[in-house]
Image (cartoon, grey):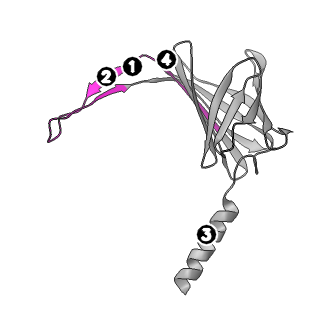
Amino acid sequence: MKKFLFLFVLLLSAGVNAQNFPDGWVGDYSGEMHIGFAEKQGDTVDVDFEIHEVAKDSAWTYKMTYHSDKFGEIVKDYVIRKRGETASDFILDELDGILIEMTLMDNCFYSSFEVLGSIYTATIYKHGEDLFFDLIVVSLKPSMESKSEEDDEGNSFEVNSYKPTLHQSVSLKRQ
């Protein structure tokens, strides 16, 4: 009986803490973004981030405002759109013809896309009241190639490595 009660409480608490977009995501956030470069000194920039519902259960703002001393204010004003009937499929609409697929898994959005010879991989996830955003950039050309030792059956495989050249990371606190 104690095991049953423990399991019931555990499942109940997991259900209470489980969140799906947009539950608990909508709001205004801010933080200090850390920008790292593989070949030069990194930098920081203050950012504000907003998620607000635009169309009931189907579209939300995705507005990131960078407050840069060097470049002034830069605004990335996009829309997240629900795609299809599954709970995991979304589109980031940059409102200029560019659409980027986003997959929601375990309260984290994942996206990867190619621009001008580089692959960009972005994540944004919710933890407690905060959001965390990470972006890394790698060249499409492998920076290293290696091959495994042969296994007992004589099989081996090649691995291409892609060295990250840039990252942007920020812990966004709810305002």
Q: Quadrant of the N terminus?
A: bottom right
Badge 2 element: strand
The image quadrant that residue 54 belongs to is top right
The mark nearer the N terminus, 1 or 4, is 4
Residue 84 at x, y = what percent? 69, 39
Q: Nearer the viewer, residue 37 or 11?
A: 11
- C-alpha span from label 3 to label 4: 48 Å
Q: Position of 63 compared to 92: left or right?
A: right
Residue at 63% over, 34% down: 102
Residue holding disc 1? 142
Q: CA distance from mark 2 to mark 4?
A: 21 Å
Eye-nearest disc, 1 or 4: 1
Tag 1–tag 2 contact (CB < 8 Å) = yes
Earlier sequence position, callout 2 versus callout 4: 4
The amino acid at mark 2 is Glu
Label number found at residue 145 = 2
Image coordinates of residue 65 in percent, x first then y, are: 78, 27
